[in-house]
Image (cartoon, rainbow, N blue to C red):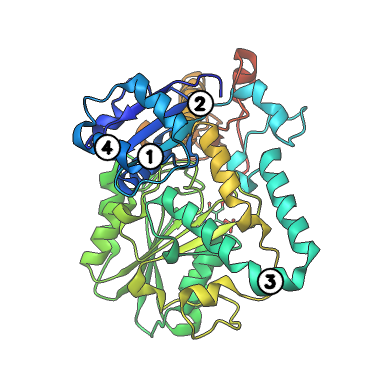
Amino acid sequence: MTQLTSFLVDFDMSLESAFAMPRLDASMASVVCDQRLGAEIIAALARRLPVEVVEPVLYPPRFCHSLGGDARGGDRAQHRHDTHALAGRRCRRRAPVTARVLEPLAYGAAQRREWPLDPAVVYLNHGGYGVSPHAVQQEQESWRRRIERNPMRFFSQELSAPLRAAATVLAELLGARGDDIVFVDNATTGCNAVLRSLDFKPGDEILITDLAYGAIAKAARYVAARTGATVVDAHIPLPLRDNGAVIAAIAERLGPRTRLAVFDHVASHSALVLPVAELTRLAHGAGARVLVDGAHAPGQLAVDLRSIGADWYVGNCHKWLLAPRGCGFLWAEPPQQALVHPLAISHGYGSGFLAEFDWTGTRDPSPFLALPAAIACHRRLGGEVLMARNAGLARQAARRLAERWRTGLGGPEDSFAAMVTVRLAARRRGDGGKRSGALPTVALRGAPHRGGDHGAGRRALGPHRRPGL
Ligand SMILES: Cc1ncc(COP(=O)(O)O)c(C=O)c1O
């Protein structure tokens, strides 16, 4: 922290006006209000800014009483003084909650030393298998050391609390409840858990799109083959004209037999961000349940599970959210939790969603336990600012390539986040030298360790040619 200024958010100030405060770049934010609301404001701020809640600073009753009477007219300088002087003393009525606003780290070349990446490589595919900064790897290592000090005690007595705490931290980021989230090794495992748990019958239909990730489409076909259900593919025409074309394609293939619809939040090959909330409403309207495959979404774009409204949402934290590899999750709407079981049935079977997924046999839980550190790191890198920057980088690169090749993007620019597809200019044999009207494309992906200086920015604009991750 360099600045130690603080500002007050009055106890009756709305969240909107708190966000409009001019000093949100200050390094210390005090929220004077009852503690529950204070914590809520800070949590909401934290979703937008790189802030973290420090120890709540508590006021004694006399001071709180006067604050409660006239907090708006309060003397801010006096408040700052008192905040420090009175720290640590208790108040039941009103108390400020203090958050530290962390300075965002520098991006691009300046960021490289924070990462284990080979300095000779401009790493273009951050979203492929993910990469964790040193700070997150150290956190993971410290969990591993703690486990190894007494594995018996750790697994039998200690694991549950930090695992649930990690789920709660993730839930806050995704607008959900920690108790509705379980960890899985990756998105493939999470999607399989849903697909393979549901009780399909002959004649039932599983709707997917032709943009679905290959592994998940295969899992759907595997389940269909074993149950007599049918996989129905909705064709999404590319390059995409607009979201209306996605909605029309799904509407055309939904029917009374559709039991489950699987939608990618960010479709891997095409990089398109699909309108999953609208698609979910459409599928629900047709009586189908919805699984959203968000393998590429958390950390690449803001995810609000409540507003999507799906029945199940699966995501990876090891791609864009900087967690160690092997950190996926499954969120389930409470009424849908009893319908799904992990791929490995273990001791928790029959004891509920959390019990079943929290223990699926002995494994290394350190990727899950290091997740809060990864989320803190993502936030420290800017959170939403980072996501917007990555999207900006990828779009800028895509525009340049499309101009140079005189082609176009795989869809409207606002249908992409930190990955964009660009149509290739390559001539194909037999097309009379015309540019191909269909994809192939290259995908461009943004990342915090990219594009910090001008030269690095240009170097970072090269294509990623291996689709499918
Ligand atoms: C849409 C989608 N689903 C699932 C996956 C599989 O992710 P994982 O290999 O982590 O299971 C990917 C990987 O990129 C993906 O893009």
Which callout, 1 or 3, points at the residue further toward the start of the chain? 1
Rendered residue at 24%/30% (across/down) = 17
Q: Position of residue 464 (x, y in %)?
A: 61, 36
Pointer 2 local density, CA inside 10 Å: few below 14, some 14–19, many at least 20: many
Give the left or right position of residue 61, taking residue 170 as reference: left
Amino acid found under the numbered disc labelled 1: Tyr
Depth check, front residue: 57 or 243:
57
Pointer 1 residue: 59
Residue 146 image offset from top left, x and y in percent: 74, 58
Comparing marks 2 and 1, which lies closer to the viewer? 1
Hey, what amino acid is under mark 3? Phe
Q: Which residue is mark 4?
A: 15
- Give 226 or 313, whichever is nearer the viewer: 313
Q: Are marks 2 and 1 in contact (CB under 8 Å)?
A: no
Q: Amino acid at mark 2?
A: Leu
Q: Is mark 1 within 8 Å of ligand 1?
A: no
Residue 278, percent from left and from top: 26, 53
Residue corresponding to mark 3? 155
Regarding mark 2 in the picture, which secondary structure is present there? helix
Label at residue 262? none
